[in-house]
Image (spheres, rainbow, N blue to C red):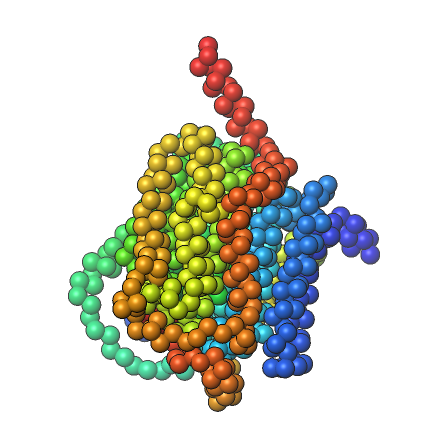
Amino acid sequence: MIGTALGVVLLDKIVYSAFLLAGVFLSISGLYILLNADFVAAAQILVYVGAVNVLILFAIMLVNKTENFQEVKGRWIRQIATALVCFGLFALLATMVLVTPWQLSVISPAIIENTIVTIGKHFFSDYLLPFEVLSVLLLMAMVGAIILARRDLIPTAQKTREIYTTSLTLPEKPRDLISSGK
Amino acid sequence: MDFSGQIASLLNASAILPEAIVIVTLLLVLIIDLIFGRKSVPWLPYFAIAGLLASVIALFYGWDNPNPTSFLGSFTSDNLSIVFRGTVALSTAITILLSIAYIENTGTSLAEFVGILLTATLGGMLLCGASELVMIFVSLEMLSISSYLLTGYMKRDPRSNEAALKYLLIGAASSAIFLYGSSLLYGLSGGVTNINTITATLQAGEGLESLGLAIALVFMVAGIAFKISAVPFHQWTPDVYEGSPTPVVAFLSVGSKAAGFAIAIRLFVTAFASVTEEWHFIFTALAILSMVLGNVVALAQTSMKRMLAYSSIGQAGFVMIGLVADTQAGYSSMIFYLFIYLFMNLGAFACIILFALRTGTDKISDYAGLYQKDPLLTLGLSLCLLSLGGIPPLAGFFGKIYIFWAGWQAGLYGLVLVALITSVISIYYYIRVVKMMVVKEPYEMSDIVKKYPPVRWNMPGMRPIQVGLVFLLIATSLLGILSNPVVTIANKSVSSSLVLKASLEARINNISATEIKTVL
């Protein structure tokens, strides 16, 4: 997992990075299996490898534009600084993980026969409200995505706008209305 | 089913009646838009406003709920949350009033705008009462995602796109950090997500062992400070304020911020009660940085929206004093100030929207000599800006005085002094705009104002702005003098809140213990 994660960040070709990202997701699901979380592991593979990663690959393929980036002057300084920051953060978090007296769950995993049933019971008892609220959130995310992606009928918008423009005696182009302060 | 029957009796679902009203309104808005299309535009926003007002009324009837905990601890509908939820809902209602003409004139569809705004409100309202980590995160995301969508609503404008992208990237990063912090908290407490019970199982540990809790605290502060745009988590604010549609900015600066403060109070007072000293320290630093940077950088701005962005950073700094004070007066002064801030800030934005609609600009220098052409707008903007600056007879003065007094009582002398100095600085840039509008001679008038269209209110969408502006003006000028009921409500909500009671009592015990020591 660490190898693939490093590969995602360090490799130059973005397609390789995308495939290696799938490797990272798969290894994470392996971690979940080790933690006895079989449902989460399956969901991880389905959602991240099956959907998110494929989407990323599609995006990369659709963009398909070779562009030579100019070498930024003093790039190595930035890279070293980034490496230092990342390493420092890693060291901090690692120390924290090691020194903290974690409270381990006393319930033996053998007692829970079916994790899906347990998760379902939680969804419909103490996590009911977040679960229901998420549905509204997803609805609105869907509406928002459609708004952003749909083709706007600019002629009709212009037409209705004309009426207002004349009656309002607004001389400007409305799109610039937001902040022509530039 | 035994399981579902048992659960249903425990839910106490009536506590989220106001939110349910908002959800129903939201769904109806979407469905009506689907069926009637553009024919529904003239009355759809009023329907949404009616829904929000109904929700506020429902909140009012939920006051002094004897059994505030609902959904098995996911949501607390105590008086504290009611005050904040009311603030969020009210700010949205006024924002919709102001946005009708603005959105119509940009040719974008109004119904979806209202729908997304209602979702953002819902997220904010749920955030105010959320008392469980999962619920907090879900409602935080709901608020953020709808804010990103609103920011990028003018999709053919590159500035709006840039603002949306910046907001999305920084926001996603900050909510990831927040999530990491809450996962640490979950691990430290041995699998408890309810913030009221988390303290009992949370082991602070000695020395290095408390590192985990400290990191969790810092990460969660980062997530929340992003929402209330406190320095150094403020970089998104000016760009987002400049690039988003002005009504959205009005909502972000009031509604979203109020929700952020509500969750800050609830989370830090309950879950981080064992590290009170530490979070006081962090918020003191944030408050000083926000006040100094926000108010000083605002001096140099030429665009009205950017200036108000920096001023809102500075105002967030003032409000944080109340949080750091951590006393009854501190919290109620926070609530009082946020409530007043709602009116004066929305009033200022109403004037900016009106000016932009009539002239298409928001440069500060273009406001020169506006007094000759549009007295009402000039009066409104002057009153709101002076109130933001804290000039005596207006509401803002009383709000600031109350916060400073509470801070002084709590012994935060340095913080209050910084606040006094920075609020004097802030008066300078507010007055500059007022002077620009009022004092300039006719020959100094800017070209834009010379071409100013004759004032007519009977245009579509203009009447709501006028009504909103006049209402906000009256509220801004009178709330200061008639502040007693508001202060009483704020005080009651704080004193009746079970969440705060524990921490306040602990503090009083501490104080009396130290007093006894000094006496001896």
Q: Whole-percent x and y of residue B42?
A: 61, 76
Residue B90's quadrant in the figure? Answer: bottom right
Residue, far right:
B1
Q: Whole-percent x and y of residue A12?
A: 29, 71
Residue located 60% across and 52% down the image: B85
Residue located 41% across and 76% down the image: B453
Count of residue discs: 0
Residue B33's quadrant in the figure? Answer: bottom right
Q: Is residue B504 above or below residue B306?
A: above
Q: Is residue B459 above or below residue A103?
A: below
Q: Whole-percent x and y of residue B200?
A: 59, 35
Q: Whole-percent x and y of residue A14?
A: 35, 73
Residue A3's quadrant in the figure? Answer: bottom left
Q: Is residue B466 above or below residue A157?
A: above
- On the question of residue B109 being in view, the answer is yes
Tell me: A127 left or right of B429: right
In this view, the residue in front, B487 or B470, is: B470
Tell me: A111 left or right of A58: right
In this view, the residue in front, B379 or B509, is: B379
- On the question of residue A4 being in view, the answer is no
Q: Is residue B467 above or below residue B419?
A: below
Residue located 51% across and 24% down the image: B510
Residue, far left:
A73
In this view, the residue in front, B232 or B178, is: B232
Residue located 52% across and 72% down the image: B457
Tell me: B487 left or right of B180: right
Image quadrant containing the N terminus of chain B: bottom right
